[in-house]
Amino acid sequence: MAENSIKIVIQEAIKVSMKSGEKEKTITLRMAIHEIQTAEKINTTTLNDSDTGLIIQSMIKQRKESMSQFLSAGRDELAQKEGREIIILSEFLPAQLSEEKINLAVKEAVENLNADTPQDIGKVMGSLKTSLQGKADMSLVSKIVKESLTKKI
């Protein structure tokens, strides 16, 4: 895969969505490109697919939080809009690991680090972050790590 290919794919998707009149998709993808370009300006470098994926994951996380707040406030139409944006952005993420594979990775990390108490959560998360970042929802990874280390007590 060519460097920065996610960005190129998003730019092409913007053109397609504009031609087909998908206004909401066009706006969402333009926001993604803006976030990517902002990060490139800050870092003064072109981002690779991994970094671009992290930006998209961050945007999805923000929308999930907004969606939750809108639902609790009874603003269903705004929550649905956030949900549609999540679906649009998710198309550009690399395939995510299944919960089963995350469980295996957590189990392996816990065993390798001899972690057995909740105080070891940071150590386990630190080792998993490098291998799973961009491939898995890190909040799910964190939840699984906490569950596995609190069961051992």
Image: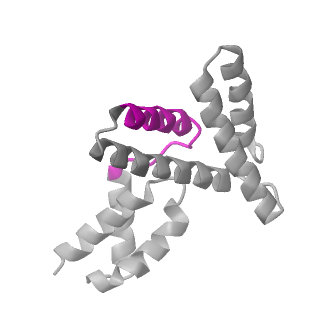
Tell me the quadrant of the picture where the C terminus can be found.
bottom left
Q: Between residues 71 and 32, which one lies in front from this camera angle?
A: 71
Q: Is residue 22 left or right of residue 152?
A: right
- Residue 27 is a magenta residue: no
Q: Position of residue 70 (x, y in %)?
A: 36, 43
**According to the image, what is the colour scheme of the structure?**
one colour
Region in magenta: 77-99
Task: Say left or right for 11 vs 88.
Answer: right
| Residue name at image x 57 percent, y 27 percent | 24
Can you give x and y, in whole percent of width and height, for residue 62 in the image? 48, 52
Res 1 seen here: no
Toward the viewer: 15 or 131?
15
Q: In the image, is 129 to the left or to the right of 69? A: right
The residue lying furthest to the right in this view is 44
User: Can you give x and y, in whole percent of width and height, for residue 7 in the image?
Assistant: 72, 41
Outermost residue on the top side: it is 20
In the foreground, 140 or 25: 25
Where residue 138 appears, x then y in whole percent?
44, 60
Q: Is residue 82 magenta?
A: yes
Which of the 4 quarters of the picture holds residue 47? bottom right
Q: Is 70 above or below relative to 125?
A: above
Residue drawn at x 43%, y 73% as measured from the top left? 125
Q: Main secondary structure of the magenta part?
A: helix
